[in-house]
Amino acid sequence: MLVEYARNILGAEGAEHAETSPDAADLVVTPLSCSLWGQEHQVVLVPDTRAAGLYGVESAVEDYFCSYGLSPEYRPRMEESGLRVSGVDEEGEPRIVELDGHRFLVATLFCFQTRSRPEEPHPLVAGFVDAARQSSVVT
Amino acid sequence: MLIGVVGDRNPANETHTMLDASLGHAGAEGEWIATDAVPSADELEERFAGIWLAPASPYRSMDGALAAATAARERGIPLVAT
């Protein structure tokens, strides 16, 4: 999602993901300073974002299977263009981003599906499916 | 209601099987689309109420995953990416 956005919205045609193109000159997704593979960590929700509204809490614990994240160099440009950081770790590093003005476009570094339960769907799954349901009614 | 799950499904990957289960929790159903078999934006929009870019490292076809993300962004199709 970040690579697509960097290429087509920020005009960074050569933007790449460090895992698939480690030698690329322009990396929008870069290795995290330490891998989060198989770990659980707290995510702090940024107030007045879609994600914060869906979670309805100030922070949550989520499962990570990931060693890459948004390049710090790209973050200011992303935010200026309308891609909002709506969840961060305890050091303020981006963990959730969402696109302003889109019906529902949310990307996470963690796998929220692992914390979904039949009696209590994960708030991001529930929010996503609600948005899909509404858009399929409209169209 | 059908969600297009773009990714290369691996039944041994728990994040994939849990993805399917989580959609069920919210009353939706996922249909997997391999990254090297992503259909046109028109077809994505017509067939799927939302698109989930599944966790994958790496995708079999980065271009396919990118095409699905572009379709969702430009056409206002709800998208999540994990």
Image: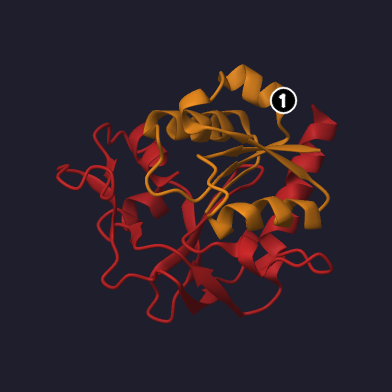
Chain colours: A red, B orange
Q: Which of A100 and A98 is in front in this view?
A: A98
Q: Please tell me whether residue B70 is drawn above or below residue A80 in the rendered image.
A: above
Visible residue check, residue A115 = yes
x, y percentage for residue B18? 65, 58
Query: Is A55 drawn above or below residue A132 in the view shown?
Result: below
**Position in image of residue A15 (x %, y %):** 27, 39
Q: Is residue A116 above or below residue A11?
A: below
Q: Is residue A106 above or below residue A137?
A: below
Residue at position x 76%, y 64% from top? A121
Residue drawn at point x = 20 percent, y = 43 percent = A26
Question: In the image, A95: left or right of B41?
Answer: left
Foreground residue among B62 and A137: B62
Rate crowding at label 1 as few (under 14), some (14 to 19) or many (20 or more) other CA atoms within 10 Å: few
Give amino acid for label 1.
Arg
Residue A69: quadrant of the picture: bottom left
Residue to which mark 1 is pinned: B47
Instruction: Identify which residue is drawn at 71% across, 57% down.
Output: B22
Q: Which residue is drawn at 38% across and 50% down?
A: A78
> Is residue A122 rendered to the left or right of residue A64?
right
What chain does badge 1 belong to? B
